[in-house]
Image (tube, grey):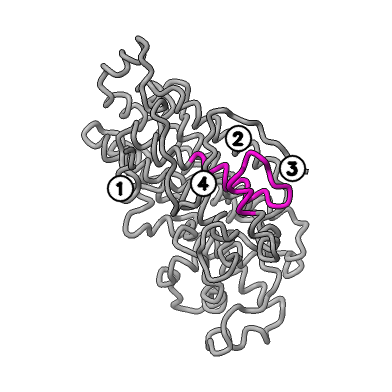
Amino acid sequence: RAILLLSLNTLLVACSDSGGDLPVPDASVLEPVSDSSGQQAEAEDSTPSEQKLLLAVAEEIILPNYETLKEAAATFIAPNGPLETYCSLGSEALAGGSGFRDSFHQLVNAVEATEMHALGPAMANGAQLRNKISSYHAGPVSACGIDEIAVLSENAGFDLSERPANQRGMGALDYLLFNKSLLHSCPPQASITSDWNELSESLRFEARCAAAKLLSADLANAASTIHDAWHPDEGDFSSEFTEEATVGQNLQSLTDAMFFLEEGAKDAKLGNPLGIVAACSSTTCPNMIQFPHSKLSLAAVNANVISFQALFDVNEETGFDAVIAERGFDDVSQRFTDNTQVARMYMETIETDLNIQVDLVESGSETDCMNAAANPDVASEALPACTLYGLIKRVVDDMKIDFVTILNVNLPGGTRADND
């Protein structure tokens, strides 16, 4: 039976994929509240509040998130830590039951929190450091390429830096550590893996573990490097990020990064694999599921939404909610808070992993998924990820119009929202 979600009068009802028409903003929503507090906020210079926002984001969100990631990655690869313990079990570890997935889940949460503020050091040199941590934003992993790393990683002269982004980071670890099949994924003509399937099961498991250790150390080093680049006692990018002369530029960079909620969480992680967004020639795109082997794809979306809410609220004194309210749009600020909270609460009720839901859509539930995405007030029992898509879309639609308009920033890519 359909589960009725808490109905919020201010929620937008329209729903379409990211390539469709944007909803037309309610003129009353974009009229500032005309009481004395609104007039006072309007009269004040907005620059100090924006600078205060960036300072709070850097100190209370970004740096702590990278500290958490740095620690989580170091713990994951530590001597006698989760990865070493898992690998010591041999191929029987693939049967599960070791609690290793919980440790990997913690690392996923730490990584996905930082994906919501991918800017500055993480994006330097073609996002080189970010790609070592997670390259999912750049497309599906190359399973064959990862198999080649497993074959080559212990060879003298092997250079991981020469491997492309889609063979690195968390996606590669998901494949190496949770894929229950030890057969390679390469075509028969691939020479590097030609003898792989003839190796004993234990040798193949050991080789995958060796590759996972190499990639995990690479990830941990990247996380530490980004953390140090932000830290006031090291690279001190925090000061550059918050200095008055670059407030406008860095506010734009931050809001651009926050649109990962659309491009990453909504579309790449939900819309693409479920077929809500046409991303491949089939009804669904199972190869675009982020963590198909550990089945932590929805956990990653959850971590994205939690991180978005933290960035939006920051603290009681400042945040995007406070800046938007200060400019006279308290109702808009409250709507963001309400819609984000509804999505978070709904995610806590989802028990069916994304793999199963993608299979259901592929087997004939495409219309049901589309309806669930378009009408998320009535939750789909069988396809909750489709409902979740619709709930996140409500937040994203407000970002595309009210958020960028009130903050006077561009949409990612430099396009202004159309408010005519």
Residue 284: give x, y in percent of width and height: 60, 65
Sequence-earlier tag: 4 or 2: 4
Residue denoted by label 2: 342
Disc 4 marks which amino acid? Leu
Mark 3 vs mark 1, CA separation in Å:
39 Å
Residue denoted by label 1: 415
Disc 1 marks which amino acid? Thr
Q: Tell me if I can see residue 49 in this picture.
A: yes
Q: Is residue 268 above or below residue 159?
A: above
Q: Is residue 155 above or below residue 333?
A: below
Residue 399 is tagged as none
Residue 217: give x, y in percent of width and height: 51, 59
Extreme-left residue of the structure: 245
Q: Nearer the viewer, mark 3 or mark 1?
A: 3
Q: Judge left or right: residue 146 versus residue 101.
A: left
Q: Secondary structure at mark 3?
A: loop
Discs 3, 2 touching: Cβ within 8 Å: no
In front here: 78 or 3?
A: 3
Q: Which residues are magenta?
A: 369-395
Disc 2 marks which amino acid? Val
Disc 3 marks which amino acid? Ala
- Residue 341: image quadrant is top right
Sequence-earlier tag: 4 or 1: 4
The answer to whether residue 385 is magenta is: yes
Residue denoted by label 4: 69
Q: Quadrant of the N terminus?
A: top right
Q: Judge left or right: residue 228 versus residue 366.
A: left
